[in-house]
Image (cartoon, helix red, strand yellow):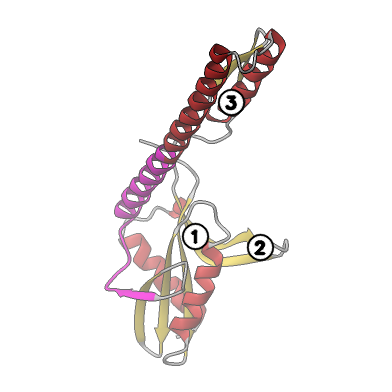
Amino acid sequence: MNEAAAVNYLLQELKELGYPDGSVRFEFAVSSSNGQRRYIDVAIIDPDTNDVVAIIEVKNGAKGNALNAAAKQVASYAKLLPSSPLSLVYVFEGQAKQIGMVNESDGSVTLIPSLPSFNSLLTGGRAQNKVETKSKSSRVTDSFSVACYLLAFLVAVILALDIAGIYKFSSQQLTLLGIFIGLLVIPYAAKFKLLGMEFERYSDGKSKNT
């Protein structure tokens, strides 16, 4: 079986698993860090978000070589995509078919009995996105808490110095201190006011939670 026949076999299997035609893209182009175009054999697209949720490398070759070569290749492609897609290999070695899930970090392969259905792939991908979003939100909250504690300590030191008469702060110095504290807090704020003007952080990301 040649590689073109293997791709056709894969396409038939994807249709049986409920993958709509619009979600399956062949020779999907991505750009590498040096600007070169690289082409993924098969990319699976979430029709609601247009994100790449899975990539599949198809290989046909000698026994023992095709699986490792496909895993290395698909792992390198996954690193070029921001959506952290599921990386899969679909390999024929002679007449034996092997399907594997690839760990992007080290290229290791875990053989699986079949490809995931389209619905389970989307459900798993969206659940992973929610977990990642929650984790990022938690990290931002933790950082903000630490910043607040440090700022509170700084204000307490200034107040203690002022009360003890060790150092008297002028109104100009206090104003600059307020601006300094505001600049430290701004990165955590979606909206803030400064000198009577209101600013709102711009975000071009779309909400993906459903």
For label 2, the residue is: 32
> In this rendering, which labeled residue sits more in front, label 3 or label 2?
3
The residue lying at 62 percent from left, 59 percent from top is: 30
> In this rendering, which labeled residue sits more in front, label 3 or label 1?
3
> In this rendering, which labeled residue sits more in front, label 2 or label 1?
2
> Where does residue 75 sit, x and y in percent of width and height?
50, 69
Under circle 1, the secondary element is strand
> Where does residue 198 sit, x and y in percent of width and height?
62, 13
For label 1, the residue is: 43
Q: What is the three-letter code of the residue carrying label 1?
A: Ala
The residue lying at 54 percent from left, 52 percent from top is: 82
In this rendering, the answer to whether 58 lies above or below 141 is below
Under circle 2, the secondary element is loop
Foreground residue, 35 or 97? 35
> Where does residue 34 sit, x and y in percent of width and height?
72, 63
In this rendering, the answer to whether 41 lies above or below 161 is below
Left or right position of 100 against 61: left
